[in-house]
Amino acid sequence: MPRGRPRASANRRLPQSLLVAAEVGLAAKSHLDLTTRDIAAIAGTHSNMIDYYFKGKAGLLTAVIDGIARDLDARLHRLAGEIAGEPNPTERIIRELVEAYYPHASAASVLFIEAWRADSPIKTAFETRHAASLFLRISRLIRILIKLGVYRADLDPLEATWSVLSLVAGPLLLKPLWLGSGSIVNPDQERWIANFTAILTPAFTASGAASAASPAVTDSSRNRPRAA
């Protein structure tokens, strides 16, 4: 493909194709090993187009993470208007997080690695654009539930937010370590949601509400309740 400005017909489609290609590439390689040539080959274009649209690999990966974070922000914003009527609000909060992040687990892993790099532009972009707002959206949901009497009056919203985020992020971090051999069963997305809900509901809810709100976690092969 010639260098320079792309044709107008490709102008609208190519950025999205590169974003998708980046996620496809990340499913096979760490972002530290994935090259712009790899990504461009998946998208069927030249690596110069990554520089043209995103100013390099870091810019492209930042854009991928931006998209995931914007989706989650929209989910949490919508949930703020619906949470009071939720029969199981803990499950709904966890579901929104899991459904936003788990389909993009390979891309989300980029952020976990970059978080430990002090000079990372990817980390800086996430901190500047999304970190505080996403954390505050979750803590506000928890404050609403405390005010409604669903969650304990003495529950610390910030500590509860850390608990939610730590629990949900755990499988994204640990899955590559423990599942590589194929000998450990990988619970599906619904099982993760059920397990996390069963753990957090009794810890967060007001006295008497836990047993009603916490779902039983079942062994799908036998349909019997089992420990989370």
Image: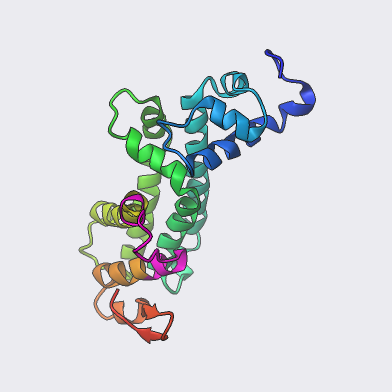
Which residue is nearer to you in this view: 28 or 57? 28
Q: Quadrant of residue 186?
A: bottom left
Query: Please, which residue is most extreme toward the top here?
Result: 4
Callout count: 0
Q: Is residue 78 visible?
A: yes
Residue lying at 75% horizontally and 27% vertically, measured from the top left:
10
Where is residue 47 drawn, in percent x and y?
A: 59, 22
Which image quarter holds the C terminus? bottom left
- Pick whichever, 66 or 186, lies toward us: 186
Where is residue 185 shown, x and y percent of the image?
37, 66
Q: Is residue 156 above or below residue 212?
A: above
**Residue 180 forms part of the magenta stretch:** yes
Magenta segment range? 176-194
Report the quarter where the N terminus lies: top right
Query: In the visual, does 117 lie left or right of 65?
Result: left
Q: Using the image, determine if residue 60 lies above or below residue 181.
A: above
Left or right of residue 52, residue 84 in this image: left
Q: Residue at x 71, y 33 (%)?
A: 13
Whether residue 160 appears in magenta in the rendering, the answer is no
The residue that appears at 40% across and 61% down in the rendered structure is 94
Q: Quadrant of residue 207?
A: bottom left
User: Is residue 188 or residue 190 the one in the foreground?
Assistant: 188
Residue 163 x %, y %? 27, 56
Left or right for 135, reference 23: left
| Viewer can see residue 148 | no
